[in-house]
Image: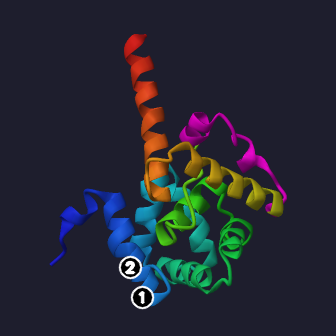
């Protein structure tokens, strides 16, 4: 019997059950993987599904191949490079996937967070992966430093995202 309520708070499900499953098995199922995609950007799921089906017409096998490869990479830098260079993910989605799988090492590269940091907007447009990695490390450090009262990288990210959300909401109401 499926406990459908676990999908209600998607991030909690992802950081708990999905992350735990990945750590144990070394791969994700298609439904686990697409929950990450939907959590980051629901609008992207159809395009990503089509891209994965070109890897293997069996979506479960395509997701298992990609996520097994992520698991087997030697370093976090190699994980990000694999998702971007070999799988065609852009920095926002690749960082979201890795944030769920490795939340102590990655944070979501997001336009809202860039707005709060007043920097890093052009990082996702860089071509040279080493420059992306260096910029991402600076972004991660800036996220960490911007919210010293929060203990985890994920909480720091949430705080910056929520601050941007509230700012936009206030501006919307004022207009």
Q: What's the residue at 70%, 71% (across, down)?
A: 77
In the image, taking residue 18 as reference, residue 133 lies left or right, namely right
Q: Position of residue 84 (x, y in %)?
A: 70, 65
The location of residue 87, given as percent across then percent down, is 67, 70
What residue does disc 2 label?
Answer: 20
* Left or right of 44 on screen, residue 120: right
Is residue 29 found left or right of 85 in the rendered image?
left
Element class at badge 2:
helix
Q: Is residue 103 positioned above or below 24 on the image? A: above
- Judge whether 92 appears above or below 7 on screen: above
Q: Which residue is mark 1?
A: 24
Q: How many marks?
A: 2
Question: What's the residue at 60%, 53% (across, down)?
Answer: 92
Position of residue 13 measured from the top left corner of the image (x, y, whole percent): 32, 66
User: Magenta includes 117?
Assistant: yes
Task: Give the CA distance from mark 2 to mark 1.
Answer: 6 Å
- Could you tell me which quadrant the N terminus lies in? bottom left
* Foreground residue among 11 and 49: 11
Residue furthest to the front: 149
The outermost residue toward the right is 128
For the residue labelled by badge 1, is the local secondary structure a helix, a strand or a loop? helix
Name the image quarter holding the C terminus. Answer: top left
Label 1 neighbour load within 10 Å: few <14, some 14-19, many 20+: few
Q: Can residue 2 be seen from the camera position used here? A: yes
Give the extent of the magenta segment: 111-129
Q: Nearer the viewer, residue 54 or 8?
A: 8
The circle on residue 121 is: none
Pinpoint residue 32: horizontal percent, then vertical percent. Answer: 40, 72
């Amino acid at each position: 019997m499926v406990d459908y309520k676990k999908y209600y708070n998607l991030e909690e499900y992802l950081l708990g059950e999905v992350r735990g499953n990945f750590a144990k098995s070394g791969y994700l199922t298609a439904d686990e993987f697409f929950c990450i995609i939907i959590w980051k950007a629901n609008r992207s799921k159809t395009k990503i599904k089509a891209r994965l089906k070109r890897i293997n017409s069996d979506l479960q096998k395509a997701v298992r191949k990609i996520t097994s490869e992520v698991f087997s990479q030697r370093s976090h830098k190699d994980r990000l490079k694999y998702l971007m260079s070999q799988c065609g993910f852009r920095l926002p989605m690749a960082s979201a996937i890795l944030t769920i799988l490795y939340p102590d090492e990655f944070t979501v590269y997001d336009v809202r967070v860039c707005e709060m940091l007043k920097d890093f907007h052009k990082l996702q447009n860089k071509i040279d992966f080493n420059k992306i990695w260096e910029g991402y490390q600076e972004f991660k450090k800036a996220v960490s430093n911007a919210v010293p009262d929060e203990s985890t990288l994920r909480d720091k990210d949430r705080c910056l995202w929520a601050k941007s959300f509230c700012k936009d909401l206030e501006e919307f109401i004022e207009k």
